[in-house]
Image: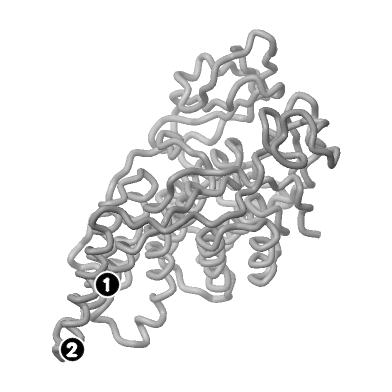
Amino acid sequence: MDCQTAGGSNNSAGGGGAGGGGGTNDACQSLWECDDWLPCLPTGFQWQHCYDLHGCEEAKYFKRPCTYTGPPPFCAENWLCQGWGKCFMNGSQSRSCRDLQNCGTNITKPPLHQKCKYQPTCDDGIQNGDESGTDCGGSLCPSCAILQNPSPIVGDGGLSAWLIAIIVLSILLASGILHYYRGQIAQGIALLGFLITHRTYKEILLDAPQRNSFFERVLAFEQLLGTDAGQKMTPAAVYSTLANLLRQYFSDALLAREDSSAEEIAERCKVLSLRPETAALINGLFAKLPVLEQEELELDLFFVRATLEELRTAVCLTSDYRHEELLRPVEEVLIDEYMSFYDEIFARAINVLRAVQYDQIEDARKGYLTLLTRYEPLSEAEKEQIYPQLRWLFDTVKFSSEMTGARVVDKSAVPAAA
């Protein structure tokens, strides 16, 4: 494969691919196109995204060594994109985007290309060919929507575990020791919630280019925050960049307008017939926006990093990703004894989410239960402020532990929000 960048460089000189896959089809002739190389990272490497316009192979990522000379002067990118174009017979569609600020950087640049399925018989309103439903199912068309809800699981010993947990909690509550063992009570309730499980499935809302674009942009923003230029950013610039990343996720995942309100996002979840678990994941993340978009907010880097980790986790739980696409190894944030309560809670939340991203569910559960011991000593006012974060975290860990499969949400049958 010979993938030329806009600058004329050849990706074969850039080292091994970090992603991709899928075999080539002799009957399909690839036509590769590559984005510009991403900025050089402090680690001494830069990444490039290449995609096959004919859809013969999966998108690929390449990296090459580079000389890091420091970040460019900060400029708050403000991308404006047209809607996705028609799906061509080669299985691809594109759009154009422009930066209204003309920064010359692409840290938050949205994806310009995505794969799509072109099937004339899947858009004629007739059940034909080997379709299992009208314009769905079979070997060519998108899968039909799953209408029935998965049945609850009561495995061997499962019911007894529930009963034991309930009995223990009842004894603790009846014994009048709530005041002394408040932390343990909270842990017990969370543990009971983890024990009561049912089958669910992941709903795929992002394709490969979209998910990889978000992984890249989140990593690039994290890297920027650790540089001198990032540390000189005003709180408003940091929160604005973070809010734009979140809004672009909701736009791509739900075909929603980037200026959507909470009510409109909830309605898009209903229009797409998303499961309650997926809707809770999305609506809970959207609830961060009013905080990020308020004026004169003091900068809290742990809060920013935790929110970036929440976005990365949402991408994981709404896409068919692979661990290596996260572009970094799983690593824990070290807990410092001098951390404030808030910082420690956000740091532990980051560790829980990273465990979820790498399917280390047992570690995620243990991390969440440990986190609760730091939550309980807070005042009622402090708890009220942090509770939505912990509730979203609990729902996310529980959701990820209950997944037994995945289905692609057919967004082609649902018009984009006007």
Q: Residue furthest bottom?
A: 176
Q: Amino acid at mark 1?
A: Ser
Crowding around mark 2 (Cα neighbors within 10 Å: few <14, some 14 to 19, many 20+) is few
Is residue 147 in view from this perspective? yes
Q: Earlier in the sequence, mark 1 or mark 2?
A: 2
Q: At numbered mark 2, what does the secondary structure look like: helix, strand or loop?
A: helix
Is residue 237 in view from this perspective? no
Left or right of 49, for residue 142: right
The label shown at residue 91 is: none
Question: Residue 206 at what x, y percent from top left?
Answer: 60, 44
Which residue occupies 60% across, 47% down? 205
From the image, which quarter does the N terminus lie in? top right
- The residue nearer to you, when weighing 341 against 221, is 341
The label shown at residue 340 is: 1
Q: Residue furthest right?
A: 124
For disc 2, the marked residue is: 174
Q: Amino acid at mark 2?
A: Ala
Question: Residue 67 at what x, y percent from top left?
Answer: 44, 29
From the image, which quarter does the C terminus lie in? bottom right
